Image (cartoon, rainbow, N blue to C red):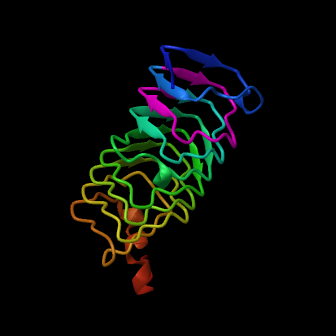
Amino acid sequence: MDIFEDKEFNHIDLTTKGLPKGEYENCQFTNCNLSGLDLSGYVFINCNFNGCDLGLIKLHNTILRDIHFKDCKMIGLQFSDTNEFGLTVSFDICILTNASFYKTKIKKTKFNNSKITEVDFTETDLTESIFDHCDLSGAIFSSTNVEKVDFTSSYNYTINPEENKIKKSKHSQSQLGGLLTKYDIKIG
């Protein structure tokens, strides 16, 4: 497997050029199109993806350690397929829709100013994560650990307290309805 360290990939359409299979460490991907690529078995450590299209990429057994996504379009990603060992990611101003984190352990993950719609967090461990100004419309929380998670500035989420671990999670008063949806009550 090839090793790429401290490389910068700028304004490249990798869907036509391809991305050599290998280990990428301390690399920067800026305004690149990776949509639909099969990145199965690749290794990414301490990399930044800025302004990239990552829609529908395949992540089977992909290693993602200390990866920061900023201003990226990430539709249909299956983070549940990644190599879970050391999985650490963060999201800033991303469109993260129709993705799945099913059964992943992503404690202390930061989601900032992102559209996280129709995302499956079933059986995910999100302990101490932060959702800062995120739209969580249609996100699925089922048997999810959201203990000590900060949802204070986020909106459009529904979490059933009886089906999820929610101890010490933080919510704004305006979003309390998302915790009470199951009870079909009106909040004035």
Left or right of residue 135, residue 164 in this image: left
Q: Residue at x 35, y 65 (%)?
A: 144
**Of 94 and 153, which appears nearest the observer?**
94
**At which x and y percent is residue 165?**
27, 68
Residue at 42% from the left image edge and 46% from the top image edge: 83
Q: Residue furthest front?
A: 1
- Quadrant hosting residue 89: top left
Q: Residue at x 74, y 33 (%)?
A: 15
- The span picked out in magenta is 27-48
- Which residue is depicted at the point 32% across and 52% down? 150
Q: Main secondary structure of the magenta part?
A: loop
Image quadrant where one finds the C terminus: bottom left
Give the x, y percent position of residue 128: 27, 50
Quick one: 140 or 150, which is closer to the camera?
140
Residue found farthest to the left: 168
Above or below, comparing residue 97 to residue 66 in the picture: below
